[in-house]
Amino acid sequence: MRGSVFMVIAMAAFAVEDLLFKLAAGHTSTGITLMLFGLGGMLVFMLLTCLRGESLMPAAIFSRAILVRVICEIIARSSFALAITLMPLSTASTILQATPLVVVAGAAMFFGERVSRKRWLAIGVGFIGVLLIVRPGLDSFNMTSLFAVISTIGFAGRDLATRGAPASLSNVQLGIYGFLALIPAGGLIALYQQTPLAYAPEATWLIVGAVILGVIAYNALTIAMRKGEVSVVTPFRYTRVLFALALGVMVLGESLDAMTLLGAAIVVASGIYIVTQGKQRPPVAKVASL
């Protein structure tokens, strides 16, 4: 249960972080915003690492799992940054809720976690709920939605690589290189958009707030993925869409309809069912890392 609580905390912080990032990108370029966000988070985690007396560059950081994690982070964050700046925050966040499906499949493949048919069915029902929100083929699913789709694959890979990270690496050490990956990700966005790398002072406090929330969310997510069973913890990612929908309506003036609310309710109900089923089965031993 501890892992699930940390996942909900992470998703709430990520949702507000996304909002601040979107607002900041409205004042300056998306690439610059992501690079500064990554730099700020990296410096915070470097400070935390030094305060804990840990190495800034441990030998384990060069493991295959960490390399995969960094690559997935670059793919995920660059594509999702474009998604939330080019389309409604609520829509981008709902597409992102496909991530747990990829993670559960990966957990079964790489970590030997067994998922019962009932829990697979519940996950499938949850995915139907996401589809009710996104509604592929209609106005809510356009070319810019592909960035959100790509980000789901990247985030799933990052989470699985986190599970396979060497146990000797602390959460704050992982945070350094997670945020470091955002700097080249921002550079890729700048190359893609081909916009001037201008900075507006109005974005400063928005970026600072996003960094603080990003650090909190990143640490909570890492704890959740390392301490909890992946196939039980990851469905709580769906709570992010609830936070995003609320922020989209209350802050950005985005509209919600009955089908969107129905889809959100299905997603939440599916997640609760999966956790209930998880408590009724014995724990499964975890196998080798990536």
Image (cartoon, rainbow, N blue to C red):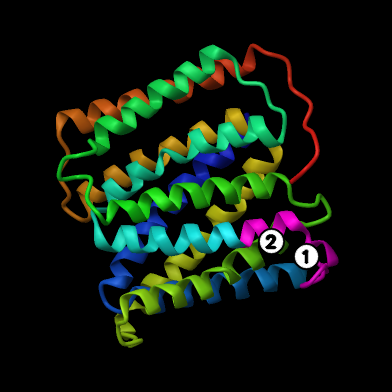
Q: Are marks 1 and 2 in contact (CB under 8 Å)?
A: yes
Callout 2: SS: helix
Q: What type is the residue that disc 1 sits on? A: Phe
The three-letter amino acid code for the residue at tag 2 is Leu
How far separated are the C-alphas under marks 1 and 2? 7 Å
Residue plotted at (69% across, 27% down): 113
Quick check: is 128 in the magenta stretch? no
**Residue wearing tag 1:** 62
Kindly identify which numbered label has been placed on residue 67.
2
| Above or below 17: residue 234 | above
Quarter of the image where the N terminus is located? top right
Q: Tell me which corner region of the image, top left, top right, bottom left or bottom right, holds residue 241.
A: top left
Image x and y of residue 49, in percent: 74, 68
Residue 50, by quadrant, is bottom right
Q: Position of residue 15 (x, y in %)?
A: 39, 51
Asked whether residue 196 appears in the rendered view, the answer is yes
Q: Identify the image quadrant of residue 7.
A: top right
Instruction: In this rendered view, identify the residue nearer to me: 36 or 118.
Output: 118
The residue stretch that appears in magenta: 52-70
Q: Residue at x 38, y 48 (%)?
A: 149
* Image position of 106 with respect to 152: above or below: above
Give me the residue at 61% from left, 75% from top: 43
